[in-house]
Amino acid sequence: MSEQDTKTLAELKKDLEEKIVKAEKELAFLKTSLKLVDEALTKVSFRPASRLMEEVQKPPVEIPKPPTEAPASQEQPFPIKSKTGEDLGTFYIGKNSVRIVPRPELGLNLKTPPFQSFFLDRVIGEMRKKDEMAVDAGTKDPDSIIEYDIKCDGDTIKEITIRNIDEDSRVRELRSSIRWTFERMLEKTPRP
C-alpha cells in the first residue's frame, strides 16, 4: 500500500468518525424530542401517542356521546407503567373519583418513601388545602373537599380511592404522581 493510499484511508476514517459522531448527536436529539412529545401528550391525554397517531391517520368517525349521568360504579381503567414499561398497577377513573390498584406482586409498603411524604402529603395534601381555601372563600361546597382511603393488607397497599375530584387536571396530576411514586418506592423495595 502506497503512502498516498494510507493517507486517503486515514482521511476516510476521520471523515467516517466525524459522521458517526454527528449521527449519534442527531439520534440523541431525536430521542430527547420524542420523549418531550410523549410527556406533553401524557399531560393532555390518557391515550398513548401511538394510538393518537392511528386516530390522526383515520378518517373521523361519529361516536355517540355517553349519557351525561353515568353510573358511579362505571370506571375506565388505565395501566400504570414505569418508564421502562413495567406494569405497576391500574388507575381507574370514575365519576369524580379515581381508584389506584398497585400490582399485588410488587408488595408496595405504606411506609416506603415517598408514598406518605410526596403522594399523600404533598400531592393530595396540596389539593385538599386548595379545596379548603375555596370552601372558606365560599366557592366550594364543604362536602366536595378531596378525600382518600387506603386499603391495606398489613402495611401492603392494596387499593387507594380518592374522591371528590372535579377537575381533569387533578386526574392527570394524580396519574403521573402515582407512577413516579411507585417507581421510587420500587427502587427502595427488595425484589426477589
Image: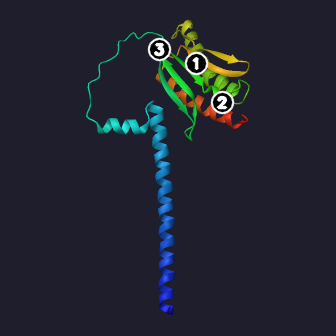
- Give the residue type that dot 2 points to: Leu
Picture disc at residue 130: 1
Packing grade of label 2 (10 A; few <14, some 14-19, many >=20) is some
Is the Cβ of the residue at disc 2 closer than 8 Å to that at disc 3? no
Closer to the camera, 160 or 89?
Answer: 89
Residue 144, by quadrant, is top right
Asked if 32 appears above or below 60 in the picture, the reply is below
Mark-to-mark CA distance, 2 and 3:
28 Å
Q: Secondary structure at mark 1?
A: helix
The residue under label 1 is which amino acid type? Lys
Q: Nearer the viewer, mark 2 or mark 3?
A: 2
Q: How many marks?
A: 3
Q: Is residue 185 above or below residue 11?
A: above
Q: Earlier in the sequence, mark 2 or mark 3?
A: 3
What residue would you read off at disc 2? 106
Q: Nearer the viewer, residue 48 or 117?
A: 48
